[in-house]
Image (cartoon, helix red, strand yellow):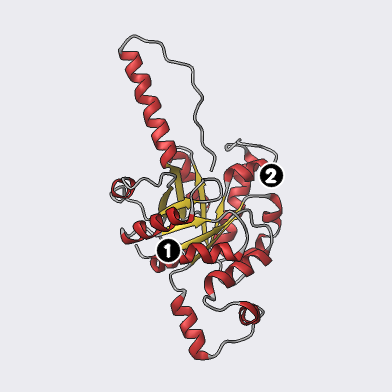
């Protein structure tokens, strides 16, 4: 899938696109992941220590394999958005967005490139571009996807204004931070959390914007978010799959060997 196809699919909403979070920068990973049936990959630089050169290698490698990389940047600084786009990202995920002004500035960074400075500010204020320049800008940025994390009560309160901002392609629920903001940390079956998810996902789809969530629940529990309106799912992460698989098989081996299972941390990962 090309980035422009992914962007169009998010707005159309007829197909559910599936991805996972890639934590490991191992050169072995792309060859393994490319045959897993994914539509895109999610690379997180907010909570994962990945340097610019590594992120660029990952972005360009996954792109060449038909898996558009969506990169979450660590800040709400438009300069960080332009950096990851320069490095090969198909999409930029902005963390913890609570107000429309952030979306507007990020739209300038992702949808008006290479306009900068005063010229970009005037365009964001509604000034029309020359027809030739407008066509160039639209073509140049056709494959750039803008996503915002919605993960707090203030974000929900401002959701209509956030969704109205031109250039936004998808909202992405951050369940850990959202549940904490709601006062029910990590209680993902709590009615308050589920009602908030339904509110966010439903609002986004009604506005013609993609609606997504990154969660580490089991597949049967992930489907509930599709029923609420989600058309993008980021399922777990490579680190979670590794931890779960290794833990289960080591436990099975110890049982077959007649050994008691060792006490261990659950290995839960919140990204």
* Residue 95 visible, this orientation: yes
Residue sitting nearer the eye, 179 or 267:
267
Element under disc 2: helix
Q: Position of residue 255 (x, y in %)?
A: 35, 14
Which label is found at residue 196?
none
Bin the neighbour count of mark 1 within 10 Å (Cα to Cα): few under 14, some 14-19, many 20 and up: many
Instruction: Please state, as top left, top right, bottom left or bottom right, where the N terminus lies in the image.
Output: bottom left
Q: Position of residue 75 (x, y in %)?
A: 61, 56
Which label is found at residue 88?
1
Q: Position of residue 141 (x, y in %)?
A: 47, 74
Bin the neighbour count of mark 2 within 10 Å (Cα to Cα): few under 14, some 14-19, many 20 and up: some
* Residue 164 visible, this orientation: no
Q: CA distance from mark 2 to mark 1?
A: 33 Å
| Disc on the earlier residue, 2 or 1 | 1
Quadrant of the rendered image containing residue 39: bottom left
Residue sitting nearer the eye, 19 or 60:
60
Q: Which residue is labeled 2 in the image?
A: 181
Residue drawn 71% across the image and 54% down it: 154
Q: Position of residue 247 (x, y in %)?
A: 40, 26
Element under disc 1: loop
Residue sitting nearer the eye, 1 or 228:
1
Quadrant of the rendered image containing residue 3: bottom left
């Amino acid at each position: 899938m090309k980035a422009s196809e992914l962007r169009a699919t998010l707005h159309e909403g007829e197909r559910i696109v599936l991805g996972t979070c890639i934590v490991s920068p191992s050169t072995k990973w792309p060859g393994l992941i490319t045959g897993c049936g994914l539509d895109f990959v999610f690379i997180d630089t907010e909570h994962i220590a990945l340097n610019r050169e590594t992120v660029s290698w990952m972005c360009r490698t996954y792109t060449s394999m038909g898996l558009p990389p969506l990169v979450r940047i660590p800040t709400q600084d438009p300069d960080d958005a332009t950096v990851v786009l320069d490095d090969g990202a198909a999409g930029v995920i902005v963390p913890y967005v609570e107000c429309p002004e952030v979306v507007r500035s990020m739209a300038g960074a992702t949808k008006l490139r290479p306009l900068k400075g005063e010229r970009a500010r005037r365009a964001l204020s509604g000034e029309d571009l020359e027809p030739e320049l407008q066509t160039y800008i639209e073509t140049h940025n056709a494959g750039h996807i803008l996503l915002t994390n919605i993960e707090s009560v203030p974000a929900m309160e401002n959701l209509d204004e956030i969704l109205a901002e031109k250039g936004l392609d998808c909202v992405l629920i951050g369940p850990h931070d959202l549940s904490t903001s709601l006062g029910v940390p990590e209680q993902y079956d709590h009615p308050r959390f589920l009602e908030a998810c339904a509110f966010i996902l439903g609002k986004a789809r009604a506005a013609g914007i993609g609606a997504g969530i990154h969660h580490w629940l089991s597949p049967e529990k992930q489907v509930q978010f599709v029923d609420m309106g989600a058309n993008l799912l980021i399922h777990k992460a490579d680190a979670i799959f590794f931890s779960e698989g290794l833990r289960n098989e080591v436990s099975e081996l110890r049982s077959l060997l007649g050994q008691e299972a060792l006490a261990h941390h659950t290995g839960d990962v919140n990204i």
